[in-house]
């Protein structure tokens, strides 16, 4: 492996920036098309996309290199964002916005008689994430570059991203997402920085002549980690950060050994096993817990990334390492980093620090973000799996635990129960390593992702640790990048904002507050303009809905939208019960002052999550009945939009009137879709949960439709919850449940939705859906009253947009930096 090549040292003369005018862009595009790809104008759009992507990438290169050189200056403190997921979506439009290349590219393409729209649509989404957590990582990188912070993302280059969803007979079908099939023009392979990651084998303990003990991890099965770098451009600031994605590759030796022993098939099989590591993104699925390949992925990312950071560490004393490096762990997925860092500092022949020295460094540079309170999502790995796959790391975890429990015993002498609770090892017939505990013990900072969530963490799940180390715990409320989610997703609104505020809002979203007076005194012309923008966006979404589902949405109706992963705690079922209730009202003629409504639900169910898949089927069956009932007509439409993802959201969120954020209180850590909708002028109907609370605080109760039990009510109700009583006391609910019980939506399959019905009616239903039905229906009535007054609705829409300035990831990242990372912005 090249230790430090000239690329690292940054000694080459400065690269001149390439011209960005229309003529040069057109020339370069044609050059790539004809001389590189061997195609001509008029070819398939994907080649035009590829040529344009290379043209744009060329124009990023000099800034990318210069940014890298700034990093490499001695003493620059850097952060490393470790995440198993980066849900990037498309990149072309993002770079065009950041590099101010939209106009020249537009005119270059006009000359070539091709449309930018069409070329844009040829780019596949980089879907390297499940949902919120992965998209948050992508928004964070955008804000880090925009804020000029030296932050590198480290992730995995999955061959297959998040599965593609299509619907057959109302059921979700998963298709593999081979997003790399036509290549990935944004990435640069850097094999010279390949790292070796060890698995299996065993450890040998030695003592050197000076009496110092050390450990070797031998007879391991090694896998190569090859980095692919993706540029992350900042907003109009010449900063280009790096997302480094690792791809697994078999080592040459590894194959040859077995090959020479005459076992060709074995050697190919082990090559496959090595390369399987980065084959596919795991869906967020309780059924996938404990899978060995997932632990391999986690260690592969972590080990390769840490080794890469140490490779870049010059000959300065390691005691200064934590002054120059901080690692942010995106959930517990990369939390093995705590033990891996210890391994490197203890075992690496040119380091071999004492335990005390190594631990001090490790704990000074790790920081952990928690994204969930759901107990089933808390990662645990069987000790026996660790023992066979990562034997050296298990030894280190045991030692960390021994030292940590000594601290606990000293603080709470005789409190055996507490020691048992806080141990990194959960005892039992099949002992488990508790990854969240490892992350907390090894980090100097632990944060939740919204105020309520962080509060519930220290009062519940992390209570013992909070009592021991209150200073470690903090909150960092999530955000979303306004470049993608406002400027790119909603060009007409962006234009209006720039007219009113100047361009500054794009990198300083707090400026949106200056729109607030327009909600009160904007005048009819301004209101009309606002409504026209929204109408155009709704028209765009209606076209997408028609094309994808065959259902016609009338843009004058209320667009009522819930898009997110399908999960019981997110309560798509509550939404559906309301839709069925509206359907009942139509059928019984209770339609005075009716508000026409188009309900859109979208999201993927984890492939092994049966109940979530049944929910999709029920949505589709209800939709088929409502949409084909002539008695319903335009009053009510329901669609399930297939294959929801980043790019679809860019059409959806600017077109939503009503944003559904209706999780069981205390269950949604933050939510980020809620912020995208708000920023674009949707009004939220939501529970007192996650970041909804902060959204409501920012916009005011009068501009938010709040309903439902609070987290403490939910907790208090446990054990005393009687869903039957809600049905008995509420004729509307009784009618809805009656339809489900009578198989009204089951087609030719009686009992099809028995499981759903039983879960709703169970006193043990953790999501307490029926408890919130009445309050939700009442809130929807308030929505309708408000909608009937277009003036009032528009005012609320403007107020929501104006109050969304705090939900930019620029604010979130500034907080991470001021309170955790302490990086100096690049000059
Ligand atoms: C775990 C084990 C095995 C395989 C996969 C996983 C896995 C993968 C992804 C577990 C969890 C995730 C993702 C979780 C997630 O997206 N959480 C969401 O994070 C958002 C950003 O903080 C919050 O806004 C959401 O509230 C939270 O649900």
Image (cartoon, rainbow, N blue to C red):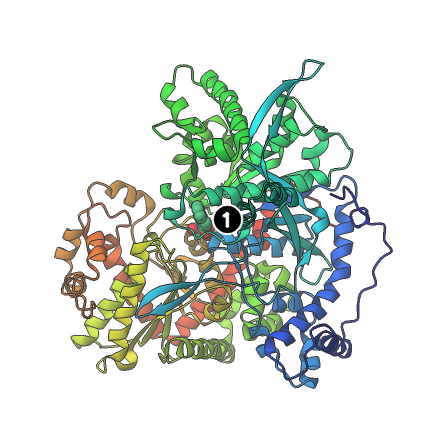
Q: Is residue 50 left or right of residue 647?
A: right
Compared to residue 311, the image places residue 117 above or below, namely below
**Which residue is denoted by mark 1 in the rendering?**
477
In front: 485, or 320? 320
Furthest toward the right, the residue is 13
| Residue at x 47% of width, y 32% of height | 437
In front: 340, or 224? 224
Residue 582: image x %, image y %? 24, 70
Residue 818 seen by the camera:
no
Residue 107 seen by the camera:
yes
Compared to residue 251, the image places residue 687 above or below, namely below
| Residue at x 32% of width, y 48% of height | 710
In front: 397, or 60? 397
In front: 466, or 282? 282
Residue 88 placement: quadrant: bottom right
Residue 658: image x %, image y %? 39, 67
Compared to residue 571, the image places residue 72 above or below, namely above
| Residue at x 60% of width, y 74% of height | 46
Q: Is residue 284 left or right of residue 248?
A: left
Disc 1 element: loop
Residue 356: image x %, image y %? 62, 22
Q: Is residue 114 left or right of residue 201?
A: right
Circle 1 residues within 10 Å: few <14, some 14–19, many ≥20: many
All told, the count of numbered labels is: 1
Residue 279: image x %, image y %? 52, 53
| Quadrant in the picture for the N terminus | top right
């Amino acid at each position: 492996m090249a230790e430090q090549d000239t690329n690292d040292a940054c000694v080459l003369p400065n690269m001149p920036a390439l011209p960005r005018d229309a003529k040069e862009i057109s020339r370069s595009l044609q050059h790539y098309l004809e001389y590189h790809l061997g195609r001509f104008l008029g070819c398939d759009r994907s080649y035009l996309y590829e040529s344009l992507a290379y043209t744009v990438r060329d124009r990023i290169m000099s800034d990318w290199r210069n940014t890298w050189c700034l990093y490499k200056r001695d003493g620059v403190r850097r952060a490393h964002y470790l995440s198993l997921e980066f849900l990037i979506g498309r990149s072309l439009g993002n770079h065009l916005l950041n590099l101010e290349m939209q106009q020249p590219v537009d005119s270059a393409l006009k000359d070539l008689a091709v449309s930018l729209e069409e070329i844009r649509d040829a780019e596949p989404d980089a879907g390297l994430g499940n949902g919120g957590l992965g998209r948050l990582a992508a928004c964070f990188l955008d804000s880090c570059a925009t804020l000029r912070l030296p932050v590198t993302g480290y992730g995995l280059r999955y061959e297959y991203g998040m599965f593609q969803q299509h619907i057959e007979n109302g059921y979700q079908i998963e298709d593999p997402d081979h997003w790399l099939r036509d290549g990935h023009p944004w990435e640069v392979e850097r094999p010279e920085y390949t790292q070796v990651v060890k698995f299996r084998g065993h450890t040998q303990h030695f003592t050197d002549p000076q009496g110092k003990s050390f450990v070797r991890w031998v007879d391991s099965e090694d896998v190569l980690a090859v980095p692919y770098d993706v540029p992350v451009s900042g907003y109009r600031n010449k900063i280009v950060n790096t997302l480094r994605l690792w791809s697994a590759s078999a080592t040459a030796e590894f194959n040859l050994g077995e090959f020479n022993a005459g076992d060709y098939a074995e050697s190919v099989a082990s090559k496959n096993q090595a390369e399987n590591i980065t084959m596919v993104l795991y869906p967020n699925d309780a059924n996938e817990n404990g899978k060995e390949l997932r632990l391999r992925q986690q260690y592969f990312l972590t080990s390769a990334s840490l080794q890469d950071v140490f490779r870049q560490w010059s000959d300065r004393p390691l005691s200064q390492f934590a002054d120059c490096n901080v690692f942010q762990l995106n959930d517990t997925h990369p939390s093995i980093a705590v033990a891996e860092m210890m391994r490197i500092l203890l075992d690496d022949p040119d380091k071999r620090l004492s335990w005390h020295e190594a631990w001090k460094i490790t704990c000074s540079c790790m920081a952990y973000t928690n994204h969930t309170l759901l107990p089933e999502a808390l990662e645990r790995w069987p000790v026996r799996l660790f023992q066979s796959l990562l034997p050296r790391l298990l030894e280190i975890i045991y030692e960390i635990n021994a030292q940590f429990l000594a601290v606990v015993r000293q603080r709470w002498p005789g409190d055996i129960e507490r020691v048992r609770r806080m141990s990194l090892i959960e005892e039992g017939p099949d002992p488990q390593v508790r990854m969240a505990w490892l992350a907390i013990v090894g980090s100097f900072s632990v944060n939740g992702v919204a105020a309520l969530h962080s509060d519930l963490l220290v009062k519940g799940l992390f209570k013992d640790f909070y009592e021991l180390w209150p200073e470690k715990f903090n909150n960092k409320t999530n955000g979303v990048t306004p470049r993608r989610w406002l400027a790119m997703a909603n060009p007409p609104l962006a234009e209006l904002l720039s007219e009113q505020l100047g361009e500054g809002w794009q990198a300083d979203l707090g400026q949106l507050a200056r729109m607030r007076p327009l909600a009160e005194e904007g005048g009819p012309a301004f209101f009309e303009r606002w409504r026209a923008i929204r109408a155009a966006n709704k028209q765009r979404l209606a076209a997408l809905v028609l094309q994808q589902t065959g259902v016609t949405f009338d843009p004058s109706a209320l667009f009522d939208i819930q898009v997110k992963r399908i999960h019981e705690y997110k309560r798509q079922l509550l939404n559906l019960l309301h839709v069925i209730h509206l359907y009942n009202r139509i059928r019984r003629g209770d339609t005075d002052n009716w508000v026409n409504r188009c309900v859109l639900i979208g999201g993927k169910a984890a492939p092994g999550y049966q109940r979530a898949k049944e929910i999709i089927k029920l949505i589709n069956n209800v939709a088929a009945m409502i949409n084909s009932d002539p008695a319903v007509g335009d009053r009510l439409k329901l669609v399930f939009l297939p294959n929801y993802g980043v790019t679809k959201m860019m059409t959806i969120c600017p077109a939503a009137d009503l944003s559904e954020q209706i999780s069981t209180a205390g269950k949604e850590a933050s939510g980020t879709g809620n912020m995208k909708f708000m920023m674009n002028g949707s009004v939220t109907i939501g529970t007192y949960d996650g970041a909804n609370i902060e959204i409501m605080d920012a916009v005011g109760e009068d501009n938010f439709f709040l309903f439902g039990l609070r987290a403490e009510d939910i907790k208090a109700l446990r054990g005393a919850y009687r869903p039957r009583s809600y049905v008995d006391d509420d004729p509307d609910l009784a009618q809805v449940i009656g339809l489900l019980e009578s198989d009204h939506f089951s087609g030719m399959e009686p009992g099809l939705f028995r499981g759903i019905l039983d879960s709703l009616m169970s006193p043990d239903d953790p999501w307490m859906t029926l408890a919130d039905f009445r309050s939700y229906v009442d809130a929807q009535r308030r929505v309708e009253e408000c909608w009937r007054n277009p003036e009032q609705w528009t005012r609320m829409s403007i107020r929501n947009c104006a109050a969304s300035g705090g939900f930019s990831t620029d604010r979130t990242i500034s907080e991470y930096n001021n309170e955790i990372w302490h990086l100096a912005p690049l000059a």
